[in-house]
Amino acid sequence: MKGLENIYATREKRFLHGGDYFPEQWLHLPEYLQEDIKLMQIANTNTFSIGMFAWSRLEPEEGVYDFEWLDEVIDRIHSFGGNVILATPSGAKPSWMAKKYPEIRRVNNRREQELQGRRHNHCFTAPIYREKIKMINRKLAERYQNHPAILMWHISNEYSGECHCNLCQEAFRLWVKNRYNNDLEAVNVAWWATFWSHRYSGWDEIESPSVLGEDAMHGLTLDWQRFVTDQTIDFYKEEITPLRELTPHIPITTNFMADTADLIPFQALDYSKFAEHVDLISWDAYPAWHSDTQTDKELAVKVGFIDDLYRSLKQQPFYIMESTPSLVNWHDVNKAKRPGMHLLSSLQHVAHGSDSVMYFQWRKSRGASEKFHGAVVDHDNSTENRVFKDVQEVGAYLNKLEEVVGTN
């Protein structure tokens, strides 16, 4: 349990309780940042993930860096004994970068290049994007490698998606050549390409699938998905290069997911393969409690299965990196947890081997697409609403259970 040993050898053994914190959204209201430190302690929280979507604040112009605000936030959390999970910002590129280097913008399966304006719409293959993320990650590692508050690295955020640009097409052809020992006829046989006259006569004819579903070439689609996993892992491995070099003592994780619609394990990446390259397993759990299509008991069975599956990937305790303390914002009807449900659902994860209960998000965003997503601190900034008190209660229970942290 290498990653766990690194955490527990030098730090107090305790459940991690806290969540994703976005101080960069509140720099114009410093009194809110001051208030957060007080509220974190009242809520019985101790650990916060910071920086995952902060690239435009960390590097507002190319080559111009600003870490002073981050220094202050980390120091404040450390002042009351809190932990920081420091995230790398590759999940959301800044606008100046998308404009100057358009080749980093993702291309969909219809060969249409996406515009700036979403997260996770970058190309995993583009050399300039890989170079840029290594540069900012090196800066982060150099600055915070010895800060006592840093508990672990949180690499990017919910790796997902695929790119169909020319760079990715070339990378895919090379991947296919390597997989089939440079034998094009072996590709034709494996993909059953004679069906509908899809046989290939040259490597340059091979490209990613543009047709999905029943009419797709199933062999091509399967190998493309294998390539997407390998290319995502390759990007991840390059992203963590400066972190392994400068901070070998700090363990690394990236947050895995589940399919939020059916609550089944995430299918777009092979997590069993990805797990070999992280020190600690973490995942983001968003079951739709109190739904109209299944009972809470039926849903809890699915949650327990995914906990067990992800725990098995490294045969050690895992981390819930995100959950909601109340509701989400993407269902047709977003239902808050009923009284008692937050404690029950949180302790289910602990019973299945989680060493954390973490939330998205600490403070509710004032605007944009997640302004109605649940948070510990709501728009009213109050400690008296039920959600805040539910979080307080979970923290109190976790404090009573510390002897099981890090155990099997």
Image (tube, rainbow, N blue to C red):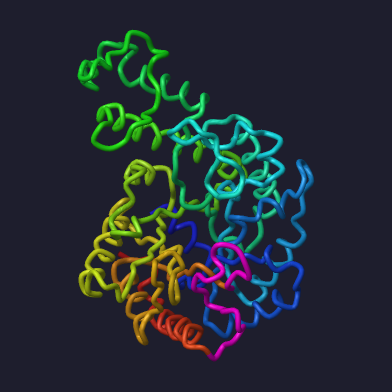
Residue 79 located left or right of residue 348: right
Against 403, residue 186 (above or below) is above
Whether residue 373 is in magenta: the answer is yes
- The residue furthest bottom is 384
Residue 55 lies, in percent from the top left, at 66, 51
Against 128, residue 19 (above or below) is below
Residue at 33%, 42% (x, y): give it: 270
Residue 331 lies, in percent from the top left, at 39, 66
Q: Magenta region's main secondary structure?
A: loop
Q: Identify the image quadrant of the N terminus.
A: bottom left
* Quadrant of res 316: bottom left
Foreground pick, 70 / 11: 70
Residue 188 lies, in percent from the top left, at 25, 16
Q: Identify the image quadrant of the C terminus.
A: bottom left
* Quadrant of res 228: top left
Against 370, residue 205 (above or below) is above
Whether residue 33 is in magenta: the answer is no
Against 382, residue 231 (above or below) is above
Residue 168 lies, in percent from the top left, at 48, 27
Task: Read off the magenta span.
Answer: 363-384
Residue 99 located left or right of residue 123: right
* Quadrant of res 32: bottom right
Residue at 27%, 14% (x, y): give it: 199
- The residue furthest top is 201
